[in-house]
Image (tube, helix red, strand yellow):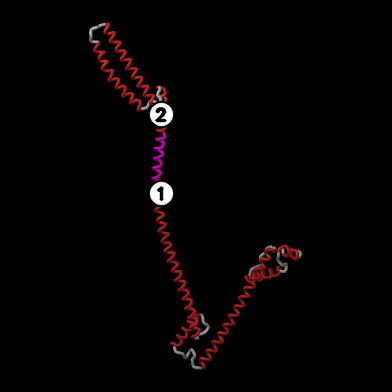
Amino acid sequence: MADMICETSPSFVEGKTGFNINQIPDVKAWIESIFDTAGKDVPDFEYTPQSISHLHNLAIRSQANPQAALIVANDLHQKAAEYISQAARIREVLENVGLALDTLPPNVVSVSQVLAKVANLLDVRDTELSSFLIAIGDINLRKTKVETKRTRIQRESKILLDHTRKAIVRLTYFKRILQQLEDDVSHSEARMEKWKTNLAVTDAKQQQYLQQHANFKELLNRVGYTPKISHRVLVKMAEQRAGLEKKTTPIVDTLRSYQDLPPDKALAVLAIEDKKCENAAAEKYLEDVLRSALGTT
């Protein structure tokens, strides 16, 4: 595949794929060096424009990392050499003034070691008092910032805790209200079912009463009832009828007494005619009363 790419026009390949044809040898050399370092043979795979471009980027990054690591290592070696040289110079000065490490008392050596550990802990380059003071001041500033941040976080935590407690109280209240509503729903459903049953019964009664009303209305029409006949008219007619009965009762009793007399045809005929006249007058009076009562309503 690499040979095929090499035979293709470089300008055409670069225009189609966006990579340089000269990257192929660099990619091959980098892959061979990687597998040679690992002690393995280079596997066979197809070289495509995409793989070549990707491998070239990896090769650039892989080569850049060792170079950077080499630069850092050289810098560290140089600093180590400087520290060693400075340590030798300081050791020579101390030996010249009679302060060699071997001649110092054990307590001085331990104090020096503690001082060195403190210097390393404070990340200072020397053991000067000013460096220690600056480092301690920096630590105090950071401590103050940490305490301030801690105080702020504690205050915010307290506020969040208060909000959480209030939320828990409200949640408990809402749960209780929800339980009450659910209980009310069950009771309301029971009452609703009862009302539906009563409504059905009432509807059936209504239909029954409507049918009875229609039957009574038809019966009243059949017997000749008119709206003019009211309860007051019937009461008045009953009172007048009672009054007429009171008047006719003596007449009927008199007629009945005549039945016990010996028959006298002339007197009987005369008496009968008188009673007929009285009866006709009473019936005419009753009819007039009824007409007058119906006319007034």
**Which mark identifies residue 213?**
2
Residue 85: x and y in percent read 56, 87
Name which residue type carries label 2: His
Q: Is residue 7 visible to us here? A: no
Residue 296: x and y in percent read 38, 26
Residue at left offset 40%, top offset 31%: 209
Q: Is residue 275 found left or right of 144 in the rendered image?
A: left
Q: Is residue 32 found left or right of 280 in the rendered image?
A: right
Residue 116: x and y in percent read 49, 83
Where does label 1 land, which residue?
Answer: 182
Residue at left offset 28%, top offset 9%: 270
Relative to 192, say whether 34 is above or below. Answer: below
**Which mark identifies residue 57?**
none
| Outermost residue to the bottom | 97
Nearest to the eye among marks 2 and 1: give it.
Answer: 2
**Marks 2/1: CA–CA distance:** 45 Å
Report the front residue among 152 and 10.
152
Query: Which of disc 1 and disc 2 is earlier in sequence?
Result: 1
Q: Which residues are magenta?
A: 179-203
Q: Is residue 239 visible to us here? A: yes
Quadrant placement of the N terminus = bottom right
| Outermost residue to the top | 265
Relative to 90, say whether 120 is above or below. Answer: above
Q: Quadrant of residue 208?
A: top left
Q: Quadrant of residue 56?
A: bottom right
Marks 2 & 1, CB-CB < 8 Å contact: no
Most frequent secondary structure within the magenta stretch: helix
